[in-house]
Amino acid sequence: MIKIFLETFALTLLLSTACSNQDQGCGSDEDCPSGRYCLLSMAECIFDCTFDSECREGYKCSTRGQCVRKCTPTAGGVEQCDGVDNDCDGETDEDLHGDACSKENEHGTCSGYMGCIEGAWVCDALEPDEETCNGVDDDCDGETDEGLQGDACSKENEHGTCSGFMRCTDGAWACGALVPAEEDCNGIDDDCDGETDEELTTKACPLDAGVCSGTQTHCIQGQGWQECDYGNSYEQGDERTCDLLDNDCDGQTDEGVEALDQCEVGAEAFDGLDNNCNGLVDEPGGCMKKHPFFNLWVDTYENVISASADCTGPFYGQTYWDNYPADFPDIPDAGDKPYYACSLPGLMPSRNATWYQASVACQAQGKRLCTKEEWAQACGGPAYLDYPYGEVFVPDLCNTWATSNNDAVPTGSMPDCVTVDGEYDMSGNLWEWVSDECKWNSSRKGIQGGAWYCYYNDPNGGYEVCDLNDPNQVEMITFMYHCGWPMNGWYCNEPDTQDPGYGFRCCWDSD
């Protein structure tokens, strides 16, 4: 124990003596103990750091306790291929590219560039090799897996057997034989039996509905199937013709085509077909147009009364005076013979019909007289026009007193007197009965639209022909030929009235 103490004391005394000698001054780092360096200006041994973290960025702590640069730029700070970080950016030999180079042997020549690897320039070109099935251009000739063929192989199914050889495809071996298929007219031996397009003459065309039904194409050996000829009625794309045919061969007839301006009469009235493409099948009583607001249809023309439901005649009530059959009822009776309302173009409309006769003629077709509201809205259309043709009254566009006709004219013969939806003569020609009772006299029925005649009831007595130049008449005249707005404006008469200026049209409630 005493011995250990003595040895420790001697060592301490020796170190104390060395530090004392050092404190006397230094001339170089060698005069300083480990971990210190000599500060020549003061001839003293000092230290800046013990750990790298005590130095500023870009510096490290040396073994002499001095903060020194981590890296000292070399070669002028320009990176060289020497395994040294010449530009002190933390990377070595980066972004160095040399000249083009190549490697060549019996398999071919591969090109590349000299690259710096571990401080030395090395050519990075591939070593040419024999081409193998690996998806790589082994011999560097610009082609991949070329000229490779394997053993014989075959593919077999219910159509036959096709032979071939193993071929390299996408870096893997696969059988290059065709897949046997049913023989088609294409100049190819599809079933691999040694014959081409054999036993092929005709086959059904792709479209086999409507006008295309039963169409066949013929095989021209070695050239393919002849183009299908579907005939003159075939319409490629959307159908354009209303003809009760499936022209585009899609299984539908006349879909989307524009409606024809024709009436279903005669045989067409009860054949179960939409002959005029207006969306209705066997619509009753001739031509009709869809109402702009309600789920109903309105007759296109002022009606003529027919003895037949198919509107083929004979027709009655077309003369200036009443010429109806004796059994045409004034008041509906279950035992009366029916007479039918027909909306047809180019015919003198029936007049002198009472409200009762107009009602039963509409009912015979499964229709009814329109209400005042329905009639007025059909006349004015979706835009609520004051007149069928617009907002301003024009005396001679429709058959009024201002024309030279001096009588009713055949239906539709005034081409400009038409509503937006296509109803004719709703202003002028004939007054038209509606179903409503008169607002100011329940015993009377409403009439709409005015007639070919117009008389002014002079308050001082007598009647005179209407005159728009007379300011006292303007309001009366323009409202007479008006579509009927506002709804509280009324023209009425006794329901048993017969007049050569009175006619009617019907409405039809349809699903």
Image (cartoon, rainbow, N blue to C red):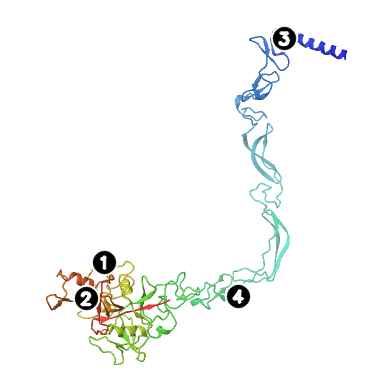
Task: Point out the frontmost of discs 4 and 1.
Answer: 1
Q: Which residue is mark 1?
A: 391
Residue type at the position of mark 4:
Leu
Q: Secondary structure at mark 3?
A: helix
Q: Which residue is mark 3?
A: 22
* Side of 423 where 203 appears, left or right: right
Q: Which residue is mark 2?
A: 400
* Crowd class of label 3 (few under 14; some 14 to 19; many from 20; radius 10 Å): some
Q: Quadrant of residue 20?
A: top right
Q: How far from the left and from the top, in percent, is residue 218?
A: 55, 75
Q: Earlier in the sequence, mark 4 or mark 1?
A: 4
Q: Earlier in the sequence, mark 2 or mark 1?
A: 1
Residue type at the position of mark 3:
Gln
Q: Which residue is mark 4?
A: 200
Q: How far from the left and from the top, in percent, is residue 451?
A: 23, 78
Q: Are marks 3 and 4 in contact (CB under 8 Å)?
A: no
| Image height of 79 relative to 437, above or below | above
